[in-house]
Image (cartoon, grey):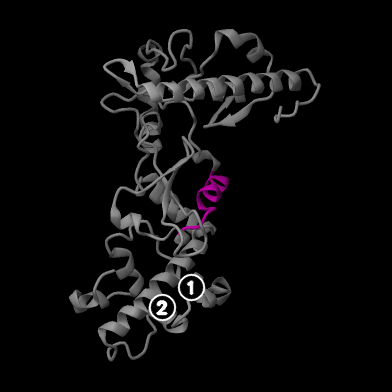
Amino acid sequence: MDDYSTNSESDYANSWITWFLSTKGNEYFVEIDDDYLMDRFNLTGLNGEVVKDYSRALDMILDNLEGEESMDDEERESLDQSARLLYGLIHARFVVTSRGLAKMLEKYRRADFGRCPRVYCYQQPLLPVGLCDTPYVKAVKLYCPRCEDIYSPKSNRHGSIDGAYFGTTFPHMLFMVYPQMIPGKAPPPQITGQVGGASSGSMHGQAGANSTGSNVQSQQPSPLGPGFPRSGAGGDSTVQNPAATTSSSNAAPHAQIGGGTLSTAGAAMKAEMYDPKLFGFRVNEMAKLKRWREAQRDRQIKRLEAIEREEANGNGAPVMGA
């Protein structure tokens, strides 16, 4: 926490929220609307979580605190801790509202929360998520919607943020409201001079250039190896398994995944897995894990294809627990 004795008086010239958001380490937060803060219904129950100085902490956030000039550094620091905690808990409620989701979406598009370190996620932007809604339990983590895994922030400043300030449901609520932002499992279109990890906005901006170079792109090998050709408009790759061509053609039900129509089994086959190697040879322990993951994937694909065949024949879907 910043020591108030080292800060200049200019820090208090602006509002407390402006000062809080401009502090290093608080880049994950968005500004809560004044209307939301002024509505006491939105703050129901928070006075029990912020044990001390709830009223004064709220007044500090709203810049209505009286007698601030007469407080010493220790009292000001204690009150600021309560104000930070209160703002974080209100922030967790605000980011799941329509206005809060819109603000967080802009930060997500700019990749303000970082990008996924996984190779086959192609620099996918991340979203903050909490592992617990209770404060002082777990620090914030970063959720990747492509590989559906969570990671720790790179910076220690961000790694010390309480996960309760974002809540456990924020990423899922964002993609429920904005389903078009759900990334597909297939690799993005290859862009010259980049590693295929550009943001969705830059990819759409170069859609015309990619469409004119379809002949060049069609010659690119499939990331899954020979026998899995690339096809589809706009550079999107539709991977087909030669051994499952018959079952895929008979599959009637399709799912909307990543903005394109694709069967569930086809989407599973399009997912890529990183294969670690040393001088071209698989790492022993990782190779065992790789074989296990491939076996699990193949089993899942067969089960999905069986379900699609059953649904196509009108016999109903079998139970997945078998």
Is residue 13 at least partly visible in the picture?
Answer: no
Q: Is residue 146 magenta?
A: no
Dot 2 or dot 1: first in sequence order is: 1
Q: CA distance from mark 2 to mark 1?
A: 8 Å
Looking at the picture, how far across and down is residue 284, in whole percent?
Answer: 37, 21
Q: Is residue 174 magenta?
A: yes
Q: Residues within 10 Å of mark 1 (few under 14, many from 20)?
A: some
What is the magenta range? 166-178
The residue that appears at 27% across and 89% down in the rendered structure is 69
Q: Residues within 10 Å of mark 2 (few under 14, many from 20)?
A: some
Q: According to the image, label 2 marks what residue?
A: 62
Q: Quadrant of residue 212?
A: top left
The residue that appears at 34% across and 74% down in the rendered structure is 16
Residue type of the residue flagged with mark 2: Leu
Looking at the picture, how far across and down is residue 14, in whole percent?
Answer: 29, 74
Indicate the secondary structure of the residue bearing disc 1.
helix
Chief secondary structure of the magenta span?
Answer: helix
The residue that appears at 70% across and 29% down in the rendered structure is 320
